[in-house]
Image (cartoon, rainbow, N blue to C red):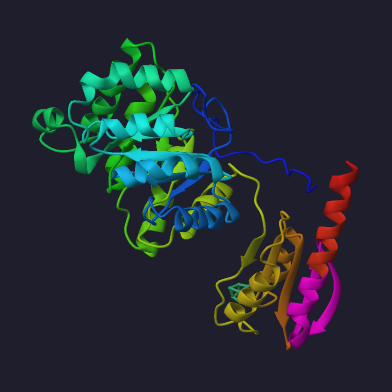
C-alpha cells in the first residue's frame, strides 16, 4: 500500500527480448531482478528450502541451486515445487541433469557450455525438451572454464573470447529455433567483464545476467560488483544480477538490492543520509547513524532520513530529506520536510526521529491506500 515514488533510472534500458523465469520476467524492459545461489547441498532438501526461504525473505527474486550429482537432481522436483521463488538448476558437466532439471519443473536451467563435454551434439534434444516445458536456458560462460577452442584462439579469456563463446552456443540453439535464452559472461576482473558484456550487448538482443565471478570476500566483492554493474547498468546493460561473495547468500541479496536502488533501477527504501563526521561534529555521528538505522530498519517506506553532525551542512541536508536531525550544543534540531519541528536534547534524538518516521510512514500508507 506504499505509493510508488517516480524515479528516473540511471539510463534507458537496452532493448532485449523478454524471457520468463517462472513468474519473474527478465529482459524486455522488466525491472532488473536480483538473484543468488544456495550454499547447501541440494540433495539436503530441508536445508536447501530453509536457505531459499531466508533468501526469499531478504528480497531474492530468483534462486539457483547446484546440481553436481544424481542425488541433487533427485531433489529438484520437491525444491522446485516448494520454493516460493523460481528455482534455476545450475548444471556443469552432465547433460543428463539438464533433462532432469527440465523434467523436475525448474524455472530455468543454467548450462556452462565450456564444461559440458559433447554439449554441442546434445543441443537439439535439450532445445526440444526445454521448448516442450517452456523452460528458458541460461548460457553461462565463465572465464575459468572457457571452451578449449576459444582458449586456443585467443590465448586467454579475453572479452572477445567470452562473448564469442556465448554467441556460438546461442547460435547452436537458434539452429533449432530456440531463443528462450539469457546469457552471462562472467570474469573475476571487472574491467574484462564489463567489456565482455558490452560486446555481447552490441551483438545480440538476449537478456543478460550480470555477474563478477569469484569477486572475493564481502568488502572486495561488494565493490567489484558495484563498480562493474554500475558501469554496465549506467549504459542500460543488464536484466538480472547476481553479486558473488564469499559470504552468506543473504548478503549478496542485500548488496544487489542496494546497487539497484543506488542507480534508481528500483524504488529506494529507507535511506539514511548521514554525514561522515569531521572536526566540527558536536555529536557521535557514527553511533547516532547506527542507532537510527537500527531503529528504522524493516520499515518498507521510501524515507530519506538525514543524520548530520553539526549545523554547517546539517540544516541544508536535513531540509532535503523527509526527516532529519542537525546536532549542535548538546541538542538536535529535528526537521520534517524542511521545517524544524522541534529541538530535543541529544538523549532524545533517536527516539524522536523514530517517532516522526513512524508518523510519516503511516501517512504514506494512508495516502497509498486511498490513492
Ligand atoms: Fe562535519 Fe558537520 Fe559536515 Fe558532519 S555535517 S561532516 S559534522 S561539517
Above or below, 160 relative to 358? above
Residue drawn at 27 percent across, 30 percent down = 95
Residue found at the very far right of the displayed protein: 370
In the image, which residues are magenta?
Answer: 331-355
Q: Quadrant of residue 361?
A: bottom right
Q: From the top left corner, tell me how far across and down residue 73 is, in percent.
A: 36, 41
Q: From the top left corner, tell me how far across and down residue 370 is, in percent.
A: 91, 44
Q: Is residue 10 left or right of residue 74?
A: right
Does residue 308 appear in the picture of this structure? Answer: yes
Q: Is residue 263 left or right of residue 357?
A: left
| Most foreground residue, 26 or 164 | 26
Residue drawn at 33 percent across, 22 percent down = 126
Residue drawn at 28 percent across, 20 percent down = 123
Above or below, 168 relative to 366? above
Does residue 198 appear in the picture of this structure? Answer: no
**Which quadrant does ligand 1 occupy?**
bottom right
Above or below, 60 relative to 99? below
Q: Is residue 99 left or right of residue 135?
A: left
Is residue 128 part of the magenta span, yes or no? no
Tally the numbered discs.
Answer: 0
| Most foreground residue, 340 or 84 | 84
Question: Which quarter of the image is occupied by the C terminus?
Answer: top right
Is residue 346 part of the magenta span, yes or no? yes
Amino acid at each position: 500500500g506504499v505509493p510508488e515514488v517516480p524515479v528516473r533510472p540511471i539510463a534507458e534500458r537496452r532493448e532485449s527480448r523478454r524471457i520468463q523465469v517462472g513468474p519473474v520476467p527478465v529482459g524486455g524492459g522488466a525491472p532488473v531482478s536480483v538473484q543468488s545461489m544456495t550454499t547447501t547441498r541440494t540433495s539436503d532438501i530441508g536445508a536447501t528450502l530453509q536457505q531459499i526461504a531466508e533468501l526469499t525473505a531478504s528480497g531474492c527474486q530468483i534462486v539457483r541451486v547446484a546440481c553436481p550429482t544424481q542425488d541433487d537432481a533427485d531433489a529438484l522436483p520437491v525444491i522446485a515445487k516448494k520454493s516460493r521463488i523460481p528455482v534455476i538448476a545450475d548444471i556443469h558437466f552432465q547433460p543428463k541433469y539438464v533433462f532432469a532439471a527440465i523434467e523436475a519443473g525448474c524455472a530455468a536451467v543454467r548450462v556452462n557450455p565450456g564444461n559440458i563435454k559433447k554439449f554441442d551434439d546434445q543441443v537439439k534434444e535439450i532445445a526440444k525438451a526445454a521448448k516442450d516445458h517452456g523452460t528458458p536456458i541460461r548460457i553461462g560462460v565463465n572465464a575459468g572454464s572457457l571452451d578449449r577452442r576459444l582458449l586456443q584462439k585467443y590465448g586467454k579469456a579475453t572479452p572477445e573470447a567470452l562473448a564469442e563463446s556465448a554467441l556460438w552456443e546461442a547460435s547452436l540453439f537458434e539452429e533449432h529455433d530456440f531463443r528462450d535464452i539469457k546469457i552471462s559472461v562472467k570474469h573475476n576482473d571487472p574491467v574484462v567483464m564489463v567489456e565482455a558484456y558490452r560486446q555481447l550487448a552490441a551483438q545480440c538482443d538476449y537478456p543478460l545476467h550480470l555477474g563478477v565471478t569469484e569477486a572475493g570476500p564481502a568488502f572486495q566483492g561488494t565493490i567489484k560488483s558495484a563498480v562493474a554493474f554500475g558501469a554496465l547498468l549506467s549504459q542500460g546493460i543488464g536484466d538480472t544480477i547476481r553479486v558473488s561473495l564469499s559470504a552468506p547468500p543473504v548478503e549478496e541479496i542485500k548488496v544487489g538490492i542496494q546497487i539497484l536502488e543506488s542507480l534508481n533501477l528500483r524504488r529506494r527504501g529507507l535511506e539514511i543520509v548521514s554525514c561522515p563526521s569531521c572536526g566540527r561534529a558536536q555529536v557521535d555521528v557514527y553511533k547516532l547513524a547506527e542507532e537510527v538505522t537500527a531503529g528504522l530498519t524493516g520499515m518498507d517506506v521510501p524515507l530519506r532520513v538525514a543524520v548530520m553532525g553539526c549545523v554547517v551542512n546539517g540544516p541544508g541536508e536535513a531540509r532535503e530529506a523527509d526527516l532529519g536531525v542537525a546536532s549542535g550544543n548538546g541538542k538536535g534540531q529535528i526537521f520534517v520536510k524542511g521545517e524544524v519541528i522541534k529541538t530535543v536534547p541529544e538523549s532524545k534524538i533517536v527516539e524522536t526521529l523514530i517517532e516522526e518516521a513512524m508518523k510519516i510512514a503511516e501517512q504514506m500508507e494512508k495516502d497509498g491506500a486511498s490513492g
